[in-house]
Image: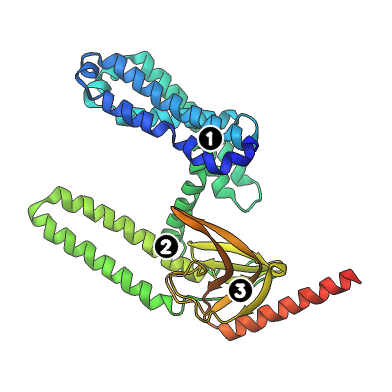
Amino acid sequence: MTTRALFPTVAPFVRLAPLPIIAAASLAIRTPWAVAHAGLAALLFLWITADGLATGLIVAERMRLGRPPAARVVLAAIALGLVGGVLGLTPPLRSALADMPWVVAVVATLVGGHLLYGAAGAWDVLRRPGVAKLEAAAACFVPPPLAQLVAKELALLHLALFRWRAPPDVPPGCQAYGYHRDLTPLMGGLLAAQVMEIVVMDVALGIHHRTAALVLFAVGDVGFIYLLGLTKSFRLHPVLLTPQGVRIRFGLLADRLVPYEAIAHVGAADGLERRGPENLCRLVAPNVALTLVVPETRHRVLRPALAVTRLAFSVDEPREFIGAVRDRLAAAQKSLEWDIV
C-alpha cells in the first residue's frame, strides 16, 4: 500500500503528534530547573512549539500531496507555534524572554512577516471570482487543517451578526424547498431560554462572584450568537433541486449533493428514526428518503462501519418535493436512453 493510500488513516495522528510533545514541554517549563534557567527554558519551549507544528504539518502534507507544502504554509505553522509558545510561557519565563531583545525581534519579524504575507495573499484571493473565497483567504493565515474551521467560524459570525432579512441562498437554475417551518418555534424557544439563562446567571452569580459571572456571561453571549447563526441558516440554506442532483442542506450542519444517477428511488421516510444514521437533519424527524443505487460506507468511531442505503431529511412540502424529484429522475433516465440510442 502506498503512502498516499495510507494517508486518510494516519493523517490525524501525524498532525496531532506534536501536541503531546508540546504538552510535556509545557509541564517541563513549570519545574524548578526552568525557573532557575528561565531564558534557556523559554527559548527551548518556543523552539519546540514552532518546530513541532511545522514538522508535523510538513510530514502530513508531504504524505497527502507527495511534495513539501508551500512556503506560506510552513511560515503559518511557525508563526502559530511562536504565538502559542509565547502565550504558554509562565510569567518568569515571559519576563526572561522580554529581557532578550533579539529574540523578541526575531519572533516579531516572523509573525509580522507572516501577517503581511498572508494579508497580501488574502487580498488577492478575495479579488478573484470563486466560491470558497473565505476558506482560501483563511488558508493564507493559518495552516490548511485549520483553514476550513476558521472559514466556517467566520461565515457563522457573519451570518449571525450581519445578514438580516437576506433572501435564501438559491443559485440560478435551482428549485428551493424550505424546511424551517417546524424548526422556527423550536429554535425561537431555545434562543429565549438562552437569553433567560444569561440574565439569571449574571444576576445570581454577580452577587457573590463577579468574575465568574463575567466569564459565564461571555460564554453565554458566544453561545447565543452561534445559536442565532444556526437558526438563521435554516431559512437561508434550503434544500435544492439543481441541474446535477439533489443538494441536501440543513443549515450549517449538512450540505451534500446527490447526483440524480445515484438515486434509485425517492419516497417518504417511513420507519426511519430521528437519531438514525440515515437522517441528515437530526433536529427533526425526516419525511423524505432517497434510496441510493450504490450503498455508501459510513465509518464510525470505535464501532464497525455501517452501510447506508438511504439518505433521509425533511422538507416543509414533502409530496411536492417527491413529485419534483421523480420528474427529474424520469427526465434524466430518458436523456440517458437517448444517449445510448
Q: Amino acid at mark 1?
A: Gly
Image coords of residue 111 (percent x, y): 44, 28
10 Å crowding of disc 3: few (<14), some (14-19), many (20+)? many
Work out whether residue 79 or residue 337 is closer to the camera in this orientation and state it: 337
Q: CA distance from mark 2 to mark 3?
A: 28 Å
Q: Quadrant of the C terminus?
A: bottom right
Q: Secondary structure at mark 3?
A: strand
Q: Amino acid at mark 3?
A: Leu
10 Å crowding of disc 1: few (<14), some (14-19), many (20+)? many
Which mark identifies residue 229? 2
Q: Secondary structure at mark 1?
A: helix
Which residue: 45% across, 53% down? 301
Which residue: 72% across, 68% down? 261
Which residue is the site of mark 3?
290
Q: State which quadrant residue 66 falls in.
A: top right
Q: Is residue 278 visible?
A: yes
Work out whether residue 105 or residue 6 is closer to the camera in this orientation and state it: 6
Q: Amino acid at mark 2?
A: Gly
Q: CA distance from mark 1 to mark 3?
A: 43 Å
First in sequence: mark 1 or mark 3? 1
Which residue is the site of mark 1?
118
Which residue: 64% across, 30% down? 67
